[in-house]
Amino acid sequence: MIEINFLSKQNQTLSAQQQKDKRLSRWSLIAFVIVMVCFTFVFAINLYLGYRVKKVEAQADAAKKQIDSEHELEASYLFFVNKLVIIRELFDQRADKQVAMNYFSELFGPEVTISGLNFNMEKGILSLQLTSPHVFVLENALATLDRPEVREQFVSLAKSNLTRRDDGRYNFTLTLSLNDESQAISVEEEY
Amino acid sequence: MPIVKSQQETSLKILINSRRQLIVAILLIWGTVGLLFFALKPQIENIFKLNQQLNHQKDQFQRVTRKLNELKLIQVSDQFREKEKVDEVLPSHKPVLELMANLYQAVTQTQVTIEEFVFHPGEIASPSADLSLLAKPTTGGKKDGPVGSSRKFQTLKLELTVSGKNENVNRFLDYIEKIAPFTSIIELNLHTSQKMQKGSLVELSQAELILNSYYYTQVITTNIDDSLPSVGEKELRAFNTIQQFLPSDFVQPTEIQSANIEDLFGIKGFEF
């Protein structure tokens, strides 16, 4: 049987289509509302974070102003610490010299005397002028310097300028480098 | 033409009437997409940016708060209270007068005689290192503590020949490295001799010395939120050692005592 009521068929099709449109519209509305709620929430978080940033910034600025008002105290302390560091460095360099002098003074005994010194603090090079009363003490002193334990303590150790004075005494120069390789240097005990 | 136009309007009306929900859905979908990309996304990005900014600000606030506490603490620090001694040992100016006054004190205390004295102080006035920081308090990025210039200190060279009894010269050599400003013997030549005095043999010494005295010249720059450096164990030991330095009776002149005098400085033991 042939359907001749076209309008009824058309209405049925349209009605089904409208139902689909309604469903789509409902889901779209739900999605829109969800996005809107999210946006409101995110916007609120933004406002809150902005407020927190401004608040912390204001607190930090106030603290900075307070620090700035005490910059004389700060400068004074920084100079105090820096000066102490430099004094410590100067002590270290000077203590190297004193440790080395004490070491050689004990090594040679009372007969060999230190009659002069030349100290380059920046390069850590110490030259000692040593005086021996006669040739036998000199021989002993030179032999002592060649001992392996002395060479271990001071890797760069050089003897030079051996001279005999009119009064029969002997002078010679001992040059050593007071850097990290000198195992005898233990500055911490010096001051 | 009017009939076609009328038909088009009618079709549009029918479409709007029959598919109204679809049109609303399309509008809502566009609205949702628009909200997502043009409102929600930038807001979320802004949240990350603000959060980062907040963390940075919090970090900076913590640093400045810590620094404020450090500043409070140093005011009650025992070492910092004794800073005058450090300034005396390593002054921020060329310590010509102090050196000469304390040298004279060493000579009189140890009873040696100065035979020769060579001193080239150069310009007596030197710029104070203290002003540099006060003139330039900087704010900005974090650095690792104060930064200084390459030259931390300058030296004042003094050539000196002293003579006297052996033990007095030895005492002088020991004394001279314990005076303020910080002074070191960098060159020494000792000559010993014997002399009959009042029927007994006296050991005499002559010491040719080159001394270096040091004074502070380092310029410091620091950021407002840099934390303050701490005093290390070795520095504390150095601090305790300088407390044992020989006390000086030198008083820095601050006014002209009298006019029409030849000796401008009035250092005891020296005439200019």
Image (cartoon, rainbow, N blue to C red):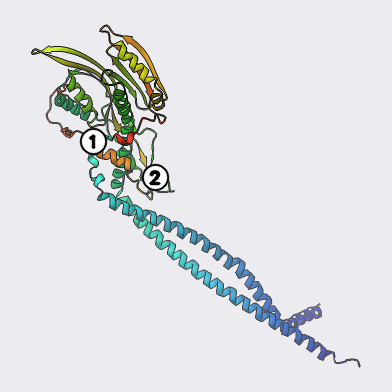
The answer to whether residue B197 is left or right of residue B46 is left
Residue A57, given in percent of the width and then of the height, sits at: 40, 59
Asked whether the residues under marks 1 and 2 belong to the same chain, the reply is yes
- Disc 2 residue type (three-letter): Gly
Q: Mark 2 Cα within 10 Å, few/some/many (few <14, many 20+)?
A: some
Quarter of the image for residue B234 reads top left
- Disc 1 residue type (three-letter): Glu
Q: What numbered label is drawn on residue B189?
A: none
Q: Which residue is mark 2?
A: B145
Residue farthest left in this picture = B198
Q: Which residue is pictured at 32% across the width and 53% down the height?
A: B68
Residue A3, given in percent of the width and then of the height, sits at: 88, 91
The answer to whether residue A184 is left or right of residue B271 is right
Q: Could you tell me which quadrant the N terminus of chain B lies in?
A: bottom right
- The answer to which of marks 1 and 2 sits earlier in the sequence is 1
For this rendering, which residue is in front, A127 or A55? Answer: A127
The Cα atoms of the two marked residues, 1 and 2, are separated by 25 Å
Q: Could you tell me which quadrant the C terminus of chain B lies in?
A: top left
Residue A69, given in percent of the width and then of the height, sits at: 30, 51
Q: Which residue is mark 1?
A: B88
